[in-house]
Image (tube, grey):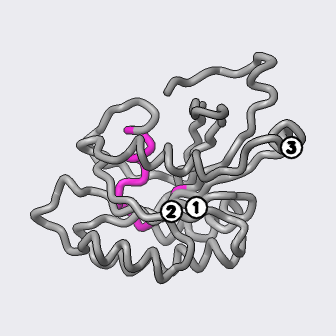
Amino acid sequence: MATTSGGSEYSSAMRKFKLVFLGEQSVGKTSLITRFMYDTFDGNYQATIGIDFLSKTMYLDDRTVRLQLWDTAGQERFRSLIPSYIRDSSVAIVVYDVTNRDSFQSTSKWVEDVRAERGNEVIIALVGNKTDLNDKREVSTEEGEQRAKEYNNVMFLETSAKAGHNVMPLFKKIAQALPGGDDAQNDSAAPHHIVVM
């Protein structure tokens, strides 16, 4: 996968999708984005303040899509900003830390927030991060899978931003689930969105 700066005739017809990453503080939302964008990991924790935005082009077998990655702060004081970023999204990725049961329990409210803003017109992915810390795991893979089933039509995947495990497959799975095909030409001006929690 490579990034492009855009500006060509080819990129003008490319569909744009907004991905919003949601979840509690310190679950690894920024680290997942950094691993996807730059294939690196920074072990020094810095809380996201407000909202950060990055963009990357993904080349799939049948099309090319532009992903707009919106990294949201997990702290309570920024919660009032979140609905406005969910409102125009097509995909929501809800991230929890497999070593922190409270972050897993909080996924319910994030999914409820997404559904309140977007109903069923959104792709939701539930992501259990930090699988490299398996010896400290508080949430089993089976629990994550079960929770995704309970949420109804929610993708599930476990990742490790630190080790790079399943990060690219996560984004590929999301990109492949995005609307595409013949209608992409007719609707290229309207941005579509992905929410990652």
Residue furthest to the top: 8
| Distance of label 3 from label 1 (alpha carbons) | 21 Å
* Circle 1 crowding by C-alpha within 10 Å: few under 14, some 14–19, many from 20: many
Residue at x 72% of width, y 67% of height: 121
Sequence-first tag of 3 and 1: 1
Looking at the image, residue 4 lies above or below residue 90: above
| Distance of label 2 from label 1 (alpha carbons) | 6 Å
Disc number for residue 92: 1
Judging by the rendered image, the residue that carries numbered circle 2 is 125
Residue 24 magenta-drawn? yes
Looking at the image, residue 7 lies above or below residue 35: above
Per the image, label 3 sits on a secondary structure element best described as loop
Residue range of the region highlighted in magenta in the rendering = 21-35
Q: Nearer the viewer, mark 2 or mark 1?
A: 2
Residue 105 magenta-drawn? no
Disc number for residue 43: none
Q: Nearer the viewer, residue 107 or 42?
A: 107
* Circle 3 crowding by C-alpha within 10 Å: few under 14, some 14–19, many from 20: some
What amino acid does circle 2 point to? Ala
Judging by the rendered image, the residue that carries numbered circle 3 is 187
What amino acid does circle 3 point to? Asp
Looking at the image, residue 130 lies above or below residue 112: above
What amino acid does circle 1 point to? Ala
